[in-house]
Each structure stands twice: as structure tokens, then as C-alpha cells.
Image (cartoon, rainbow, N blue to C red):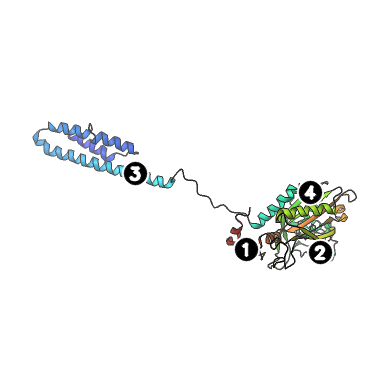
Amino acid sequence: MITKIEELLKTVQEAAPKSAAEVEELRIRILGKKGELNALMEEFKSVPAEQKRELGQKINLLKQTAQERINALKEELSAAAATSAEKVGDMTRPAAASADGTRHPISIVKNQIVDIFSRLGYTVAEGPEIEDDWHVFSALNFPLSHPARDMQDTFFVEKRSNEPNVKDLLLRTHTSSIQVRAMEHQKPPIRIICPGRVFRNEAISYRAHCIFHQVEGLFIDEGVSFADMKQSILYFAKELFGETATIRMRPSYFPFTEPSAEVDVSCNLCGGKGCNVCKGTGWLEIMGCGMVDPNVLEASGIDSKKYSGFAFGMGVERIAMLKYGVKDLRLYFENDVRFLHQFDDAL
Ligand code: PHE
């Protein structure tokens, strides 16, 4: 009997149940009504009197040890269950929203502009930021030593000589270079929209930066007229600034378009009455445009007798400033999250 008690004691001490059900099994086996302990008590009755003291103590020890061990095991398991439940949490709760990044206001406005022209059948074209003189200037009817080149202060990457050269490498000053590449490689009809980063060696101020973004467009087909251009730009202005927007065109000059115009949109902040954003005029300047100069078509191998077209170009920062009433263009480059978060819902 004594060895039996000692065996049971060992079983209890070494038991390593993995679940509450296994602990319960152990409890029933040792402490249950029909368990080992009660069987021992039964046997104890017929033990000779001189052994009763020693055996009685052993049985009591077994009982106590079994109870303590089983209680401890129960606690351990329920504590472990609680921490894993804490980790998983409430499985039915909706997942916490992850803090996704949001679009930069310049991307938002660029996408809006691109979307509007996509609806008119324009497709997006892209090109290199480091360009050669030919695609940025010469092919666009800027003669090699023409003062019009000074309209855009250029960052040069590689100069071939002191004089302007069609092979000079430079940072593109406008995305019109993409339009030249399109005209070289595609046959009309061409209907493209050209978003991209451009670079000009200008002093940084509230209204100018040496890096900014443009969206330019080009439409070439048979019989394209100034009226087509006006209507397309009016549609664009209404889509971007609202149904009540109107436009006006003022004569202007660009080497690659003839005639050329500057487009103003009615000031959406004061409704045309005059405010400090439109400087009391009721109008905001939004883009340059014009009919593609026949020289430009010919330079890229397009028959100017058969085809005509129009082009336009705008600065995304400027449009975004007008649309959101932002007074300092530098804010778009500082990326202060307090500024950027104001555009979270502007998608
Ligand atoms: N490329 C001109 C600029 O950067 C904008 C423009 C494009 C004007 C097309 C007329 C036609 O200033």
C-alpha cells in the first residue's frame, strides 16, 4: 500500500495537463468519488493498527498534495487562457482602421485635371525629366539664339558649347517636350495629356519654385479650330471649378503656338465680384494655350497643310492654390502634416 501511495504522489507531482479537461480528468482519477484516494481510504480500514499512523499520514499528504496541485494547475491554465484571449481580443469587433497615407494635394489636383481630359478622350503621355534642347526648345520653334529662351530660366546638365546647341542636356522647363516626342512617334489624330515635374532656375517665393508640376495637353487632327480649343477649355474649367465658371482669353505669346492666349477663369472665391485672391479683378489666370504653330508640326514630321491642332499648359501648384485658397506655394513642398491632413477628404 505504501508503494501505491508513493506512486500516486509522484503522478500528482509530475502531472502536466495541457487543458482544463485534462486537469479535471486528473482530479476525478485521484480525488473523485470512485477515485484512488477513496479506494485507499477503503483499504485503510483493514490496515493493522500499528501501521495506521504512518499510512494515515501518507494518505493525508497525498490528499493535500493532490488538492493543492490541481488547484494550482487550474489557475495556471486559466491565467494562460486569459492572456491569449487578451491578445486576440474580441473576435467579432470590427478591425481598427489602419492609418493609411493620403494623397498629396498636388497629386489630387493633377489626378482631377487628368480625369477631366480623359473624359474628353485624352490619354496620358510621359517623358524624361532630363531632356535635350531639341525637345524642350528647338523643336518648339525657339530658334537657337532667340530671346524667348529667356522666358524659362533653364538648369543645364551638360552644355556642348557656350552657344545654345540642340544637343545640350537640361532639365525640362515644361512638359511640352513630351508633346514633341508624341508628335515624332505618333500619327494624327493625337490627343494627349502630359503631367510631369518641371524645373526652372527661379528664386523661391510664395508664388514661384524651382521645381513644380505641369499638365499640358495637345490635340492634333484634321480641321481642329480655335473654337474647339475654347470649348474644350471651357468644359475643363466648369468641371474643375464648378458649373458657374466662365472663361476669358487674352492674347499672349508662346513661340510654339500662333495665335496664343492666356486663359482666365472667373474667380470662384468671390464669384467674380473681386477679392484679394483675384486682386479685385474677378478673374484668375489658369493657363496658356494656342494653335500649334505650323513650324512645330513640320519640325516633328506632321503635314501642316493637312493637320492643325491646339495645345495648352497649366501649373498644378497654381491651380491647387486657386482651388483651395492656398496663399503660399511653398506649403506644397514643406510637407508639414498639419497642412497635408487638410486634404484628407479632398479625393
Ligand atoms: N509650355 C508653356 C509653359 O510652360 C505653356 C503652354 C503650353 C502654352 C501649350 C501654350 C501652349 O509656359
**Relative height, residue 106 to residue 121 (above, below):** below
**Relative height, residue 223 to residue 17 (above, below):** below
User: How far is mark 4 from mark 3, CA to CA?
Assistant: 70 Å
Query: Which mark lies nearer to you, 4 or 1?
Result: 4
> Where does label 2 land, which residue?
149
In the image: residue 89, left or right of residue 180 = left
User: As shown in the figure, which amino acid type bears the numbered disc 1?
Assistant: Glu
In the image: residue 187, left or right of residue 21 = right
User: As shown in the figure, which amino acid type bears the numbered disc 3?
Assistant: Ser
Frontmost residue, 332 versus 23? 332
User: How far is mark 4 from mark 1, CA to CA?
Assistant: 34 Å
Image location (x, y in percent) of residue 327: 66, 65
Query: Which mark lies nearer to you, 1 or 2?
Result: 1
Q: Residue at x 32, y 36 (%)?
A: 22
User: How far is mark 4 from mark 2, CA to CA?
Assistant: 26 Å
User: How far is mark 2 from mark 3, CA to CA?
Assistant: 80 Å
User: How far is mark 1 from mark 2, CA to CA?
Assistant: 30 Å
Q: Are marks 2 and 3 in contact (CB under 8 Å)?
A: no
Residue 164 falls in image quadrant: bottom right
Residue 191 — which label? 4
**Going from the N terminus, do you reach mark 4 or mark 3 first?**
3
Residue 48 — which label? none
> Where does label 3 land, which residue?
78
Frontmost residue, 127 versus 247? 247
User: As shown in the figure, which amino acid type bears the numbered disc 4?
Assistant: Arg
Q: Is mark 2 within 8 Å of ligand 1?
A: no
Image location (x, y in percent) of residue 152: 78, 64
> Where does label 1 land, which residue?
334
Seen as rendered, the residue at the extreme right is: 305
